[in-house]
Image: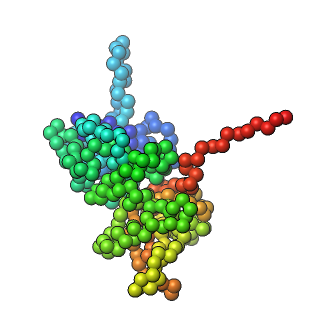
Amino acid sequence: MLDFLKIPKARAVLDDGTVEDVVLPTSLTRADAVAYDADRHKGKLHCPSCDVKLHFNRGSAVMCGGTMQGQRPHFKTNPGHAHDPSCAYIVMHDDVEHEEVDRTRGYRIHLNLATLSTLFNERARHYQRAEGRRIVTDDPRLVGRESLAVQSASDLITRLLKNGDPARIRDSVVVQGKHILPWNQFFIRHSSDGKDHTRFHALTERLLRMNKGARLPVLMEIRSDRPAQWNQRGDAGTMDSQKFFWRRSERGTEFIAPRLYLDPPAHGKLATETAHLLQAITGEAGAYLVMGFARLHTYQTRNGLLHALNISVSDESQIARVELRNLRKKPTPSVLKPD
């Protein structure tokens, strides 16, 4: 049954509110995760993609003299507990098995960045449990699409932007909580020559039509002329993308300015490590892709009206340094010069 999926990692919520990514004791050491420790983590584990509680299963040895293999260590949901219908693990392991999938169509992409906030784990409204506890959907925008769950900006870049079928990518939709976004409303980038900001314009328009404080999931291109600016304590920073002209209206000249707020978790060892990793990633000017929630802050300046597209970054998985125009370039073969 789906409620007993074997999961290779977990999310621990400690007594002081600190959140840790937890991997199996047998896993390779990772800078962004800690190995399971019963004294520290028992009773505090959750699924990486939803809030269902997990426990550690140490597995079992191979039966002596038999042919049956033992189970490897893993994390499992607690008996009687169910994954949320929006959970990426369910989407990956179950949804595709029970419907006809047309692999010429675009993907339905699920964002599985569980360490960020509850925004990334908001209950999906497009899926239901059917007989046998299967996860199904009757939303015509989603039916028949191959599911793809991504866990970081780098994951999405590698699996889609670098190696995916461009036609399928353009036809894809991103499912996040109540949102179903066409790819071109999720992937907010400049034109290849850097002069066309149409997707930024459209995002700003959408946010202006929404309630104040509204947020939309995006994968946004940031082009910064300088490294991120951190405070003296080194626990928070900002990175400003290049500001550009949008339009002239009855309100005056209007500009758009994307900005990252680098806000690691407030407490604990993980917070310090996250801050150091974010500083390392954003330590140079250049082009970045950031996955997060864009919100709009509009205010008057001496030069006109400024629409700031703000994205909070609290985990290194949200951001990757990449030059889009070089993503699909194949390395030039070396030419041997004659002696």
Residue 84 appearing in the image = no
Q: Where is residue 215, by image quadrant?
A: bottom left
Residue 285 locus on image (x, y percent): 60, 63
Q: Eyeballing the image, is 315 above or below 61?
A: below
Q: Quadrant of the N terminus?
A: top left
Q: Where is residue 242, by image quadrant?
A: bottom right
Residue 288 locus on image (x, y percent): 53, 59
Residue located 31% across and 40% down the image: 102
Residue 10 locus on image (x, y percent): 36, 45
Residue located 37% across and 33% down the image: 73
Residue located 35% across and 40% down the image: 103
**Residue at the farthest left position:** 131
Q: Eyeballing the image, is 231 above or below 83?
A: below
Pick the residue in front: 19 or 14. 19
Pick the residue in front: 97 or 338. 338
Residue located 57% across and 66% down the image: 224
**Residue at the farthest top position:** 65
Q: Quadrant of the C terminus?
A: top right
Residue 2 locus on image (x, y percent): 25, 38
Side of 212 relative to 313 (left or right): left
